[in-house]
Image: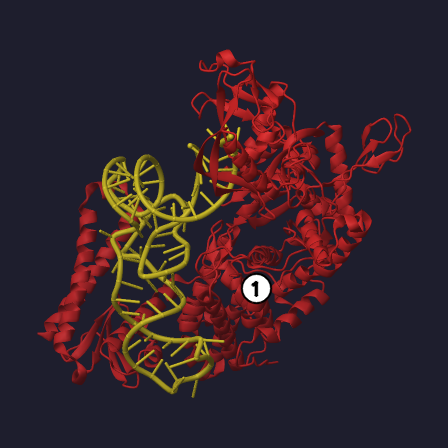
Chain colours: A red, B yellow
Amino acid sequence: MKKELPKTYSPSSFEGRIYQEWCEKGLFTPKIDKKKPHYSIVIPPPNITGQLHMGHALDNTLQDILIRYKRMKGFCTLWVPGTDHASIATEAKIVEAMRKEGLTKEDLGREKFLERAWDWRAKYGGRIIEQLKKLGSSCDWTRERFTLDEGCSAAVRKVFGILYDEGLIYRGERIINWCPHCRTSISNAEVNYEEQDGHFWHIRYPLVGGGGYLEVATTRPETLLGDTAVAVNPNDERYKHLIGQYLSLPLVGRRIPIVADEHAQLDKGTGCVKITPAHDPNDFEVGRRCRLPMEVCLTEDAKITDNYPKYAGMDRYEARKAIVKDLEAGGYLAGIEPLKHEVGTCYRCGTTIEPMVSLQWFVRMEPLAKPAVEAVRDGRIRFVPERFDKNYFHWMENTQDWCISRQLWWGHRIPAYYCDDCGKTVVAPDGCEVCPACGGHMTQDPDTLDTWFSSALWPFSTLGWPEKTEDLDYFYPTNTLVTGYDIITFWVSRMIFSALHYTDDIPFDTVLIHGLVRDAQGRKMSKSLGNGIDPLEIIDQYGADALRFALATGNSPGNDMRFSDEKIEAARNFANKLWNAARFVMMNLTIEGIETPDPAALAPEDKWILSQYEACVKSVTSNLDKYEIGVALSAIYDFVWDVYCDWYIELSKPSVAAGGERSAVAQNVLAYVLRGILCLLHPFMPFITEEIYQGLPGEEGNIMVKDFPEYDETFVFPAESENIAKVIDAIRAIRTRRNEMNVPPSRKAKVYIETKFPEAFRDAGVFFERLASASSIELVSEFHDDTAIRIITDAATVHIPLADIIDFEAERKRLTAELQNVEGEIARAEGKLANESFVSRAPEKVVNAEREKLAKNREKRAGIVAALEKLQ
RNA sequence: GGGGGCGUAGCUCAGCUGGUUAGAGCGUCUGCGUGACAUGCAGAAGGUCAUAGGUCCGAUUCCUACCGUCCCCACCA
């Protein structure tokens, strides 16, 4: 049965249908076979607030390529999909939506708020999944998970309990990063430092009892209200005698001591540092060491507290102005210095964070980090490209305790309970209502956990942990984690230490890192710039395959890439090329099915294309195994376009037209190689390959579950390949010459070939006629028409009598230039070979190659010289 | 302050562990409505591989320095 392809490639006409077919046949769901090796990936769960953006498109394209490749390679493959509840981001969106209705969280109350949140998730959580499907993602949707679903929640509570019992989770008052906009603490990893223009205010603090003042400097003068000391270095001769004395805090009048602490450095500024233990991490430490009181002067929304009536209720920046003004009026201000400095901002909302002392839950990182570093160091987990392990090590080795509690409602509620009566703390994954100590009523901690706390468990919680499930047993550890470099610290590192600690195993063996997708000018795509490109629009316009191609090609792991119209058009053009090649092949097929070619029946060009095809298989496979996805894809691209289409299809046309046995053999080779191409390309461009495949005669089922081609040396024919290469070389040379001379293709000419390799050219006449505008071809041992043009290739001298249009002067010039070129090459090679140390030290292979090249060029030179003589 | 990426054709980028006359896409120029494809075909032009040293028989590739550029990390008052 023959199937005609429509004339133009129109992806929208079949992509949806094919995806549906895969789903209906359940092809994404693995049939667990313990005899087979597994290959599994867990998706980086997109936020439920999200829309598919180019970053997702890239990330998921790469994952799908790997999954499809391994599936065809015979692995039992599982790609686990899911979404992330994204506590802070989602909550912010919901609060924002409520604000428009004039509602606040508090108006609603926790329960009603959470109802809204789940509604939100129902409404938007599925959207991005649908978008992933459009991309062609072959995820097992029957295993779709959500970071806040029952299984993940159970895992989270279990982990919290384990860590608590081990003393690796603790609750304490520490300085944390507070986001006044999100009204929650955030972890160190969630703080972005941005350079901002600021000022250095120099302030004089008078000594109590007169006798002068100490000068301190600050970038945040409003924190003066919370000062409880000024520190000097214990070895500072200038101030040693003042230690223990008191200063009067300007504007406030509080007596604050002068304390000695190493934190104050001799050579910085005046050597005196104001100490605000409640609002600065360093000062907090100083405060602990020197037993200073803590004075909170800012509220949760970064306003001055009621303790300072003059400034109470003022926003921190407003207060800053007022305080500076008052300091100046009071004669305390010693100077203002402009300053560029790095200011911490919230990675979600961009608000400047405020360090604040607060009672929070923390994970003790040091004991967890050690094995996590080890796993990468000893190679159990590998980053691709490798350089990202430096990033990882640096972060892991310097990490501070992880603040995991959030003052949010949308998330995993902390399974800690406090007794209303005796204050006892109980951590209970299964809940706790009665105090085990006094029988009092227990109240659960109102806070929730950092989103990343649940994401950290994703590779095993999605497979059923802590239950001992079949999936966990078979698919875990997973194999490749694909993600962007921007998320290594947030997520990758936390999955690694979590997995090692709870599952006693690595979460995955390879981390494939990709870069950012930037716009055509190289700028980050962002909402504020409005330069984002919507992958869905691209899919509508060009097809998912073209999008995938554009994202997978032309870049290497870990590097950013640019997305442009040119790129997507090039991708679409390639799809169109393949489409039309397939259309041509299929409209000429009279055979009933595709067979493995019989070497005995093959023509040289058949052997040539099969050899080229095998080389392509080898390259694609080895590059995919190295995660060089872009290189693998361009190997296919080059083979399809430059080798299969430009040459083999053309070379095969005479045979196909000839009919009979030769035609059948050529048709079979055409179809055989086409099928191979489709298989090689399927992981990258699943839709078009499936669509074409299903039109091939005698083929049944779906290409996505066929075997990936294996390199097979029995189809490598070096001798015939060499011969066809010689023919191609000569055809190209003729075309070039004719082009240079502006001979129109319609002007046919006789071609005489003088060659030492007659076997290569003997049956090639028809190729020259069709592809080099030859009217006929004749092999000659000598040629005497001095008015013919001469074209010298490595293997032959081609004579074409075109006397009437030859410009002898131009011809001489060209040949002379060519001679010069060849002589340069000869001189270079001779020089190299004359170099004793090159001959003795370079590998024999290299030396021999040089010798061969020299011989070839000498022969070529002889040909050119002969041609030049004829022109005299 | 520490760490890293990048600098190769007009533009965007490949070039694996050093070894042909350094490649591709786009763009430019020339020709072509050729029976799969003008989303195409056939050709051409275009690069002192940022700069300077070093190692080596040999460096775009390795090392050092330097310039430019981008990013990550860091509590500097």
Label 1 belongs to which residue?
Answer: A535
Q: What percent of the width, then of the height, locates residue A652? A: 43, 76
- Classify residue A382 as left or right of residue A179: left
| Residue that appears at 55% across and 67% down | A538
Q: Residue furthest right?
A: A439
- Disc 1 residue type? Pro
Q: Quadrant of the N terminus of chain A?
A: bottom right
Towards the viewer: A212 or A535: A212
- Vertical position of residue A193 compared to residue A727: above or below: above
Q: How many numbered marks are there? A: 1
Callout 1: helix, strand or loop?
helix
Q: What percent of the width, then of the height, locates residue A22? A: 68, 66
- Vertical position of residue A608 compared to residue A411: above or below: below
Q: Residue furthest front?
A: A329
Towards the viewer: A414 or A61: A414
Q: What percent of the width, then of the height, locates residue A477? A: 66, 43
- Classify residue A853 as left or right of residue A494: left
Q: What percent of the width, then of the height, locates residue A101? A: 73, 59
Examine the image and state in which quarter residue A288 appears.
Answer: top right
Q: Residue furthest top?
A: A241
| Residue that appears at 19% across and 74% down | A790
- Classify residue A337 as left or right of residue A44: left
| Residue that appears at 38% across and 65% down | A721
